[in-house]
Image (cartoon, rainbow, N blue to C red):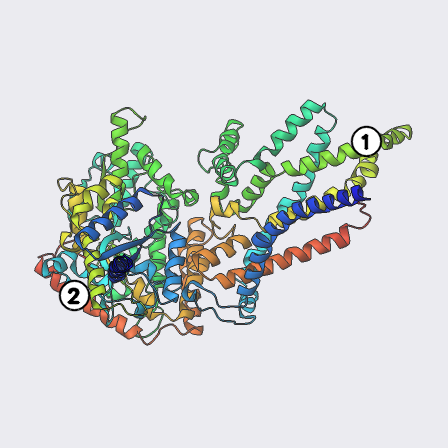
């Protein structure tokens, strides 16, 4: 009895110890800033009155929602970016994982590591490399285009191409984590199911559509939600490469929040913008779970 | 024994009390400048502070070095909000006095008595510096230390290219050049070297686009477009929009023609970074760019590296020349806009007394002393074009190679031809908070957007200018633009214009071909 009590005590103790670190971290660096941002969003807290912010109710929210040329324009840009990024952000990792999965263990590891590499490199480095690849005059892509008889493009320096260029950059650089998730999910699908399909003489497409795809649904749902969140929160492209331009073509919501905060010095307005973005993401995630999570087994 | 012991104890206590009393009497000067603690400059400033402490026993300098520029602004604002602003803070009139960025609480700033400067010092600074460091009814509030230019009036060009097509930088510096002469020269250079006229990254496009606009003569209080939301877009007297649509279209159209008619500028260079401009200039890919003589140091280093074969490349013979202007009736040379940096002294609660204020102002005088200039120069801090007007050591001839015609031209041009920026007065005093917000939004969402739309050939210059001015008119129709202080600002500008005329006439420069003279 004592041994059991000790063991339980010990297990609980260590469980709380490990959880405690994470909970403390989340409280200090996640929940507290969110709470403060929420409180600031109801104040007129700007650089002008740092020491004397006042409660102004919903004024910041009303100002944002009425800002058709600013806020809603940024929402439009972020939504367009999300629509461009998410489908490919799901299908490309899935396709690559399907290609990698049949390979031997060594090759699998090599490709997984290679595709995941941009994920462990600093975002600044990735942005600078991508900027060089798409540089309007002498970038790598233009060099390749010219070599194959194409015309060099101005990419992110062109208002018609800038958003697409950032979408393209996302396709190139941010699918590593999706490949890892899909590879892990694929390896967990029991071979016996495929063997049964083989006995029924199922085609490759039927095997994928009737077995692989339904069994990958939980991962797909996760990848979709995370991709939507990442896309709506996109910032690095605007910050390191386009500065929101040209012609406001890449004026994402997060870029607007950044400029409102750092350039305009309007902390409470930026906080309200961040709260609205958080709500939008939360609503979209709930919708995803509700409509696309049906039949998903975890 | 015990009496002896008590006696010693009393003596020690007395001495300790006295020492602490002396320590309390020590006058502490709190200083915050935008230098990070890790930088070499911070160590230097600490040494400067110690030197002052040695010269002034009883005064202690307490440095606050921020972690970043943002941290600097935050620290400063928090201190001001608590009515415990630092005794000395570094900043400029145009930037730090923008409401929303700090230091705008004018009542917190102690004016510097004019008597603190000698006649020679005031003359050396000139009216433009004094104006830019002052406020209506407040006089001088910044201890002037350094001066930056807006970069609109001058540009750095490849002298070899210009000479090869028969143009002399010396002559351009003497008499200026017209926009037509500029285009012809660039066409010849393009044919000869395949070099573009200039690039269009942020700041460069904004400067190029207002060259013709700024070349038009107008009252001084209407000059200075291209300085963002602090520009004079509304008439200080009538409150009406003064951004001239036709002139704006012509000014932007000049850039449009350079891109699409003459093919001397690449539209896609709008997407380049500022650093790309210097790279292109050093490679000979562009003829010039808009900037001050601090860029000459970079070019000089490049030339040294090429000469010493540290890097491959060509030696670039750079020259500073005024930007081209319209040689027609009603037009004239483009003035550069200066921005003064210096030191503020803040009131504190409770008030520490006049002796403290005097110590603070003496310290300001001390830290702008020429004695520290060689050290500063060796550290590369601050940049070469910043140390122009520093108290009695104004112009700092020892630091500049005055035999370099670029430098001597620029120093002279800077002192007498340039105009002071009025952004700090417009933003800080004249515009209402609602107008500031609306103008700032308009500048980003309409002015820059339409300018870029024209660069990318999405709109004609006329359409872009019309849309821009129309959007501005909407602000004028729906927002209260000016505060009652606007009248004082206008008066101050008019006073400056008169002082400037007297000053230039005293210097015999009133009729100089490059002296900007507006209309009244």
Element under disc 2: helix
Q: Describe the element under mark 1 as helix, strand or loop.
A: helix
Between residue A250 and residue B447, name the one nearer to us: A250
Residue holding disc 2: B114
Q: Quadrant of residue A107?
A: top right
Q: Where on the picture, by quarter, is residue B357? A: bottom left
Instruction: Give neighbour class at mark 1: few <14, some 14-19, many 20+ (Cα, 10 Å).
Output: few
Q: Residue under mark 1: which chain is it in?
A: A
Distance CA(mark 1)–CA(mark 2): 89 Å
The residue pinned by badge 1 equals: A204
Residue A90 in view of the camera: yes
Query: Measured along the vertical axis of the image, is residue B311 above or below residue B155?
Result: above
Question: Quarter holding the C terminus of chain A?
Answer: top right
Q: Chain of mark 2?
A: B
Residue that lies at the very extreme toward the bottom in this rendered image: B484
Q: Is residue B163 left or right of residue A258?
A: left
Where residue B514 sits in the image (x, y, percent)?
17, 53
Which of the two discs, 1 and 2, sits closer to the camera? 2
In screen coordinates, is B503 left or right of B26?
left
């Amino acid at each position: 009895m004592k041994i059991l009590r000790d063991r339980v005590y010990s297990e609980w103790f260590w469980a709380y110890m490990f959880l405690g670190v994470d909970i403390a971290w989340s409280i200090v660096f996640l929940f507290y800033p969110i709470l403060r941002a929420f409180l600031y969003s109801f104040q007129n807290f700007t650089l002008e009155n740092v020491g004397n912010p006042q409660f102004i109710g919903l004024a910041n929210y009303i100002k944002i929602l009425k800002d058709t040329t600013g806020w809603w324009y940024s929402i439009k840009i972020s939504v367009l970016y999300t629509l461009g990024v998410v489908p490919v952000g799901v299908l490309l990792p899935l396709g690559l994982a399907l290609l990698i999965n049949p390979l031997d263990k060594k090759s699998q590891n090599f490709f997984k590591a290679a595709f995941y590499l941009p994920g462990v490199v600093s975002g600044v480095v990735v942005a600078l490399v991508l900027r060089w690849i798409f540089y309007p005059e002498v970038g790598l892509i233009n060099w390749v285009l010219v070599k194959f008889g194409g015309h060099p493009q101005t990419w992110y320096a062109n208002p018609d191409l800038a958003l697409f260029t950032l979408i393209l950059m996302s396709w190139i650089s941010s699918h590593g984590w999706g490949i890892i998730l899909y590879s892990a999910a694929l390896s967990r699908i029991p071979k016996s199911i495929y063997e049964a399909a083989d006995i029924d003489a199922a085609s490759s497409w039927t095997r994928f559509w009737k077995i692989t795809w339904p069994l990958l649904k939980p991962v797909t749902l996760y990848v979709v939600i995370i991709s939507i969140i990442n896309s709506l929160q996109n910032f690095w492209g605007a910050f390191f490469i386009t500065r929101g331009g040209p012609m406001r073509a890449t004026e994402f919501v997060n870029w607007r929040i950044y400029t409102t905060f750092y350039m305009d010095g309007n902390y409470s307005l930026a906080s309200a913008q961040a709260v609205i973005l958080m709500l939008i993401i939360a609503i979209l995630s709930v919708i995803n779970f509700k409509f696309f999570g049906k039949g998903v087994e975890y | 024994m015990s009496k002896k012991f008590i006696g010693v104890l009393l003596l020690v206590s007395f001495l300790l009390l006295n020492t602490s009393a002396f320590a309390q009497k020590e006058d502490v000067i709190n200083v915050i400048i935008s230098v990070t603690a890790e930088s070499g400059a911070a160590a230097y400033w600490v040494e400067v502070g110690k030197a002052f402490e040695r010269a002034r026993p009883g005064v202690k300098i307490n440095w606050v070095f921020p972690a970043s520029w943002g941290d600097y602004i935050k620290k400063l604002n928090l201190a001001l909000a608590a009515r415990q602003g630092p005794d000395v803070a570094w900043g400029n009139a145009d930037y730090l006095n923008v409401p929303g960025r700090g230091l705008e609480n004018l009542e917190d700033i102690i004016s510097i008595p004019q008597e603190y400067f000698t006649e020679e010092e005031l003359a050396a600074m000139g009216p433009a510096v004094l104006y830019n460091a002052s406020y209506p009814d407040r006089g001088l509030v910044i201890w002037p230390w350094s001066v930056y230019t807006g970069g609109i009036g001058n540009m750095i060009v490849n002298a070899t290219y210009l000479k090869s097509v028969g143009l002399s930088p010396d002559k351009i510096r003497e008499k200026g050049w017209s926009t037509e002469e500029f285009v012809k020269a660039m066409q010849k250079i393009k044919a000869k070297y395949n070099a573009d006229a200039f690039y269009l990254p942020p700041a460069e496009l904004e400067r190029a686009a207002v060259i013709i606009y700024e070349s038009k003569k107008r009252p001084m209080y209407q000059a200075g477009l291209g300085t963002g939301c602090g520009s004079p877009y509304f008439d200080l007297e009538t409150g009406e929009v003064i951004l001239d649509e036709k002139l704006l279209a012509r000014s932007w159209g000049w850039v449009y023609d350079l891109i699409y008619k003459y093919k001397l500028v690449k539209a896609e260079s709008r997407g380049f970074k500022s650093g790309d401009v210097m790279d292109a200039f050093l490679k000979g890919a562009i003829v010039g760019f808009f900037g001050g003589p601090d860029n000459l140091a970079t070019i000089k280093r490049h030339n040294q590296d090429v000469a010493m074969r540290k890097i491959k490349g060509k030696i670039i013979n750079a020259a500073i020349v005024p930007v081209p202007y319209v040689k027609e009736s009603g037009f004239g040379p483009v003035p550069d806009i200066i921005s003064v940096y210096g030191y503020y002294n803040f009131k504190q609660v409770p008030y520490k007394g006049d002796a403290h204020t005097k110590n603070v102002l003496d310290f300001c005088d001390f830290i702008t002393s020429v004695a520290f200039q060689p050290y500063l120069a060796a550290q590369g801090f601050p940049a070469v074009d910043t140390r122009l007007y520093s108290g009695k050591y104004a112009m700092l001839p020892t630091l500049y190679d005055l035999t370099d015609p670029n430098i001597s031209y620029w120093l002279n041009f800077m002192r007498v031809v340039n105009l002071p920026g009025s952004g700090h007065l417009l933003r800080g005093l004249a515009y209402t908070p609602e107008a500031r917000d609306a103008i700032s939004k308009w500048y980003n969402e309409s002015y820059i957007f339409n300018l870029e739309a024209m660069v990318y050939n999405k709109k004609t210059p006329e359409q872009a200018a019309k849309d821009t001015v129309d959007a501005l008119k909407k602000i004028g129709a729906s927002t209260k633009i000016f505060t009652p202080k606007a009248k004082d600002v206008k008066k101050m500008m008019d006073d400056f214009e008169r002082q400037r005329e007297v000053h230039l006439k005293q210097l015999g420069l009133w009729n100089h071909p490059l002296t900007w003279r507006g209309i009244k």
